Each structure stands twice: as C-alpha cells, then as structure tokens.
Amino acid sequence: MHSHKHIQAKLYYFIFITFTFSYFLHIPKNYIFHIMLLHQKTTLKLFQIKNTKEYTMSIELSNISKTYNGSDFVLSDISVKIETGEFFAIVGPSGCGKSTLLRMIAGLIPITSGELKINDKDVTNLPPQERSLTMVFQNYALFPFLSVKDNVAFGLKARKMEKSEIDSRVINALELVNLSEYKERKPGELSGGQRQRVALARAIASDAKICLMDEPLSNLDAQLRNKMRSEIRELQQKLGLTLIYVTHDQVEAMTMADRIMVLNEAKTQQIDSASDIYDTPSNTFVAGFFGTPQMNLIPVTLHANSQSLNNESGLNFPNNHQLSKGKYLVGVRPNALSIDDSATVNNGLITTIEYLGTHSIVHVILDNSLEVLVETKSAEHLTTNQQITVNVTGKYYIFSEDGQSLLLTNGGYINDGKSSKEPKLQALF
C-alpha cells in the first residue's frame, strides 16, 4: 500500500519529467497543465479507493453450511453480514457449531456450501493467509521456549518483514496490552491473564483489521475474566477492529458485543443487540439461555371466551390480547414474580432459598407441581417448607406451544418472523 508521501513523490517526479519533455518537444504549457491535472486526479482517486478498501473490513456469510457425511449438519444455512469495526459475538451451548463457524471464517475448515466474502471479495476457497485476518485461540498457542517479544514477533518473522518494522510493531503491541516490562520473560513466568495479553499483542502486531477470538477467556478465573472483558473491548474500539468473538458465556456476549448471534443445534436462533435479545427473545431457547437465573416457562391453556390463561398453578395471566383458544407457553423472569407470605389462600411451597448478597433466589413448587424461581431483595422472613403465594408483578412473554416462536412480548408486539416490530396490541401491564 502506497503512503501519502510516496504518492506525492511520484507526482513531483511526473511534474519534472513532464516539463523536461515539454521544453524539448515544444508542447504548449496549457496542454501540459491539463495532462498534469488529469494525472493528479487519477492518482489520488486510485489512492483513495485503495485506502478505503484497506480500512473497510466487512464479513458476509451467505447460506453457509457444514457437514462431514453429507447428511448430519454441523452448521446449517448461516447468513449474516458483520460490518466494519463491529464487535460481533457468536454464543451458544457446547456442540452448537460456534467454534466450527469461526474456523470456517478463518479458512481452517472447508465450507461445504454457501459463500464467504471479506470486504466484498469471495474468499470461500482461499487459504487462511489470504484472508487478511488474525486469530486468538483458547489455549493462547504460545511457544514456551520463546520470550514474550519473540512470541509476538514470530508471525512477522515468518512473513520475512524488515527487522525495524518487526521491532516497531512488537513494541507498539506490547505497549497497548501493558506488557512492555515483561518482554524478555518466558510464558511460564506469566500469569494466565498476562499470557492472554501476549496472544492479543501477537494479533495486534499482525496489523490485520479482522480478529477472530475463540473463547479466549475460558481458562481464566472469574475476576480476571471481568478485567479482560473490558480490556478486549477497549482495544477493539481503539484499533477499529472488526472482531468476531466466540463464547458459551452469555454474560461475556451481552457485556462486550455490538450484536450477538445465538446458535443452537447447528442453526441461527437470533441475531440482535444484547438488549433486544434479552427483551424480545425469538423463542424459548433464547429466552432461557439469556438471563440469570433462567426464565420460568409455564404451560397454559386458553379456553373459548376465557378472561385468563388457565395454567392450574394459581398464577394469573390475563387474556386481554385477543389470543385464540389453544395451548401456549408463558415465560416470566424471576424478577417479574413476587412472594406474598400473608395471603390466606396460597399457591406455592418454598423448597430452597439461595442468598446471593444483594438478593435471594427462592425456589417454589406451585400447586401443579411446577417449580418456579422468584427473585426477591428480602428473604429474611421466608423459610423452607413455608406456604406462600406467588404473584405476577412484572412483564411476561407468550410463546407458541412448541416454544419455537414468540407471539407476544412485554411490549405487546407480535413476532411475525420479520425484523420490523410494529406494535399490534396493548402492553401486558
């Protein structure tokens, strides 16, 4: 890639040659001026296009699928466009295909069908080194016999870069991750968090504008994970990286990502911002996967002309949304339920109380033998084996009987499978 100074030098050289030839060939000066102007505009235009491509690194997956035997799909029909500079998280349970998808983007695993584009260029069948990206693995992939600086420089040396350029990149990368004073140490002399920073520094030194991370924090303890989450997010924003981050931890995905793809059983369940996934989950899997503790799911039946959803549990869900008769699943988060221990008619029995400092999680068996979790700020007056009443005091969600689609959210929207969320009904409360 040519720098501004290089382009400027070429322009000056062209001016010198043009005037020299014009003197000997007696070409009119006004012709020379127009030639120079045309050349300058063309050169700068070409430079501008190249410069834009260098810093525009979008990734587009179109109907990507992966199978090893032709029938059982590890991934099925995955489509998404990840924009330049976006922090995009892929989250799901073990075995859902998220790491396989990341390796397909990297070029480490071949794509069975579909198309992968990086910066509008088809790279489906290109090798990893031609995809303009770098990758950070779960196990850091550091050489134990090399120093920190040599680990960071390893890939640059393999590319046969000039020593001065390598040194400059290594110094800059180590400064960014606050490891300059550890550059001579071996990985075995570092903590887990420091080793993870070395892996990050190596990715930064490559100067790739796309970075793939495969569960990079899973080997760290909870305190270090919290610290590294903010550091990775800060680095991503500072460097303008397009970052794809794979994790099984919904907290990591929600706190770091601009958008999240939820995978389960080889298929995309939802792609949205953290707030939209939490507030408007597309199905019961997403609703249960996001949020701690998990959402309570209660089977209900709506009879003709009924004013409430019958669930034989004693919980009251009004039918004020023109739902047709049939069976549904109602989802209600633990913080949308409350406990009344003074009622004369009770509908539940406390089995367990989990004290978590700022709040407690109370396990309750309802009249229909269904267990629900209730979050309460004060549980001092509650005991196990106590008869109480559980009331619905917050928002709830109504899903189809099979749990595959959200029919009504707390805001009263109907999910028609499209991206638009046109308000159809009144709010639930």
Image (cartoon, rainbow, N blue to C red):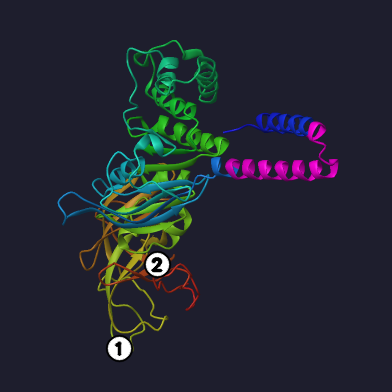
Is residue 291 something that shows in the picture?
no
| Relative horizontal placement of residue 111, taking residue 60 as reference (left or right) | left
Please report the bounds of the magenta region as a residue range.
22-51
- Residue at x-position 43% and y-position 66%: 395
Residue lying furthest top in this view? 184
- Of the 4 image quadrants, the one containing the N terminus is top right
Q: Main secondary structure of the magenta part?
A: helix
Q: Nearer the viewer, residue 240 or 179?
A: 240
Q: Amino acid at mark 1?
A: Ala
- Is residue 93 covered in magenta? no
Q: Return the mark for residue 396.
A: 2
Residue 143 coordinates in the image, percent (x, y): 33, 18
Q: Going by the image, does 280 lie left or right of 165?
A: left
Query: Whole-Å distance between the Cαs marked 2 and 1?
Result: 22 Å
* Above or below: residue 366 compared with residue 378: below
316 up-or-down from 146: above or below: below
Residue designated by label 1: 304
Left or right of 16, for residue 98? left
Q: Residue furthest right?
A: 29
Q: Position of residue 107 (x, y in %)?
A: 33, 40
Give the camera-side residue of 395 and 400.
400
Say if the magenta span includes residue 32. yes
| Closest to the observer, 28 or 304 | 28
Which residue: 73% across, 45% down? 38
- Sooner in the amino-acid sequence: mark 2 or mark 1: 1
Residue 400 visible somewhere in the drawing: yes
- Describe the element under mark 2 as helix, strand or loop: strand
Q: Are marks 2 and 1 in contact (CB under 8 Å)?
A: no
Look at label 2 and name its amino acid. Answer: Tyr
The residue tagged with tag 1: helix, strand or loop?
loop
Between 48 and 259, the one lying in front of the other is 48
